[in-house]
Image (cartoon, helix red, strand yellow):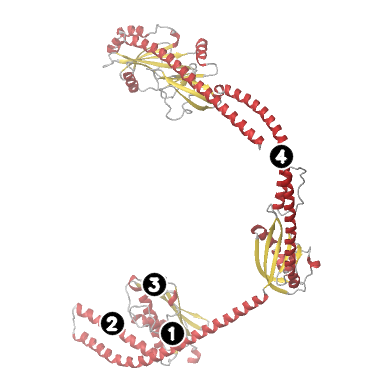
Amino acid sequence: MTGSLVLVVIAALTVAAYLQMRSTSVQSATTRLQGVVQQMAALLRNSVTGSVAGIREVARKPEVEAYLRDRSQGSRAAALAALRYAGNNPDRMLSVELHDMKGRTVLAAGTATRRAAGIPHPDIILALDRRDTAMVGAFRALGDSVVYPTFGLVGPRSNPLGYLVQWRLQESTPQTRQTVNGLIGPDATFLVGDTLQRSWTDLSRMVEGPSRFLRPGTDVERPQVVRYERPGRGMVYGATARGRGTEWIALVEFPEQIVVKASDVFLKRLLGIAAGLIVVALVAAAVLSRRLTGPLAQLATAADAINRGELVKGVRVARNDELGHVAEAFNRLAEGVRASQEEREERFRMMVEQVQDYAIFGLDAEGHVTTWNAGAQRLKGYSEQEIVGKHFSRFYSADEIAAGKPTRVLQIAKAEGRIEDEGWRYRKDGSRFWANVVITAVHDREGKVTGFTKVTRDMTERRLGEQLLRERTRELDETLAKLRVAQESLVRREKLAILGQLASGVGHELRNPLGVMTNAIYFLEAVISDPPAKVKEYLGILRAQVDLSEKIVSDLLDFARVKPPQRQPVTLREVVQGQLERVTRLDGVKVRIDIPENLPPALADQVQVGQVVLNLLTNAMQAIGERGGTIDVRARVRSDKLVLEVADNGSGIAAENLERIFEPLFTTKARGMGLGLAVSRALAVANGGDITVRSKEGEGAAFTLVLPVADLGKAA
């Protein structure tokens, strides 16, 4: 502990001293960098001032203005003479160009004339106007050389005649480089660029500037220091300053490793001193800890062992001070814990061994039996000597062993901590019992699985009871279902009996007034030869309603007493065509008939079969309704039966109504009593056949009439 504290203090002092030294170095470099870049900006300003003064002098010559006004051959020679450069270093003056206000070159002089390429003419005029008639442009590459232009207005500023462009070659002599290095230092870098930071030069060639490295929004108008990374050079500190009255900015860069070199040397010295202090502190801490912490470490190790459940005899500390007294007290405590744990383990072992109703035994990590109680011996038939060391898979069936179930349940218990299962297990004598099994993983202090405990209960009686209960419940459900069917059948028969009695009386009472109404309608149609459209419409409505009432009465009477059929060979094609003439057609409904000519006749009552077909066609028409659709009538022979199907693509029948569709008085229509299909099924059954339906709501319905085939030999 003492050694760690010393290390922390020494490290903290070293870091603080280094950071302070580094901060001082950076601040000193920043101040020097700002001063140097201001000096370099002043040198640029002096250079630019000379260039601007020179071009103004040439631009003010009368010969130049005269040529821009008349451009005669006589003034050309004088203008060329005026344009020739006569100052210092004439070899650096590449060319002098004279342009009119439209940007056209009207005269050029020099050894390597060129135009102000890449600079739009309006931009030059605007820049000159802002720069008081003369300015210096940005650096450009010309082959392996660096050049820059100087611009000057010709004529009055308020009404200029044109402008001059002087292209100068920028060369860096050894003397210039020596002067620059003397100002900024040999490890620093000096660059010159334009205010837009688009082009940079080191005064001998064009180079990549810091534009992509400086933070966005860096102000180049005032000297400031920015830290950024240069590819190939690492981190640098750079400062920029603009030459007043120029488009040039100066940049000076100091490598960071040079700036912090002094602080790094200081850090190395501090680390050497700190290392020495640490060695001294560690030696002192080792001597002290050997005397004080040795006994404490023994006590801590013994305490951890007791915490893990291990039985320890104590520690040996041959001292008469406080640590010795603590060791003696600890040894007494450890002995008490050991005795208490042994007593608890003995009680638990005896309790488990004496349990008779549960098979409780232990398994090692591979599934071999390690312990066995009396309940396990009673339930499974193995003695402890017979089973300990054997694999627990012998309690499973051969199929379960082949499927790998014993291994799988141990894997699940190992992964999830426990598994509970029920199934048939086998005793030593081969008999089986229904068992509830719980397998729990046993872990050591480090969390590693060292084995499993398995608790098994005999649940055979409960399972047999559950099976018996399920059988009795199933029998009871079947009996209740039969009772419900019988009850519904009885109620239905009572309703039908009452309905038959009612229909028999009401039917005859209603047919007499309906006959009178039919005769009245017939009389009116006969005596009124040319009735008005309204009268004709109402007579049609009356006839339709009378026919509907007649059909309801007929259905009631037919349902009340189905007449014995007069069965004879009947041609289904003729029956269908005859009933199609009777049914009320709706606009937009198409009927397609698919009945083979050679279809054998059916053995049935022609009138009753016709009534069934009429009901099926009427229902199909009503299902389609005004929206229009298709009705398909098909007939085929199926073994010894004739099958007539009437299918529509109407609204279909809901699934919950399919079972009740043939019940008397059940209907989903706004009109009608719900007897049509009930009567139709009764007539079909009376003729030795039946009617079934299949439908899906929204996709139409198909009714199938099954009738016996007529034996023509017997009929003859």
Question: Can you tell which quarter of the image residue 532 is in?
Answer: bottom left
Q: Which mark is residue 294?
A: none
Q: Which mark is residue 544?
A: 2
Q: Position of residue 281 (x, y in %)?
A: 68, 31
Q: Relative to residue 153, is residue 93 drawn left or right?
A: right
Q: Residues within 10 Å of mark 1 (few under 14, many from 20)?
A: some
Q: Is residue 169 above or below residue 3?
A: above
Of the image marks 2 and 3, the number of the one nearer the N terminus: 2
Q: Position of residue 373 (x, y in %)?
A: 75, 68
Label 2: element kind: helix
Mark 3: which amino acid? Ser
Q: Residue at x 44, y 72 (%)?
A: 696
Mark 1: which amino acid? Arg
Mark 2: which amino acid? Ala
Mark 3, residue position: 651
The residues bearing labels 4 and 1 have C-alpha atoms spaced at a distance of 108 Å
Q: Is residue 223 above or below residue 641?
A: above
Q: Residues within 10 Å of mark 2 (few under 14, many from 20)?
A: few
Name the foreground residue: 67 vs 200. 200
* Closer mark to the observer between disc 4 and disc 1: 4
Of the image marks 1 and 3, the number of the one nearer the N terminus: 3
Q: Does the CB distance between marks 4 and 1 fall below 8 Å?
A: no
Label 4: element kind: helix
Question: Can you tell which quarter of the image residue 147 is in?
Answer: top left
Residue 233 seen by the camera:
no
Mark 4: which amino acid? Leu
Residue 211 seen by the camera:
yes
Q: Which mark is residue 292?
A: 4
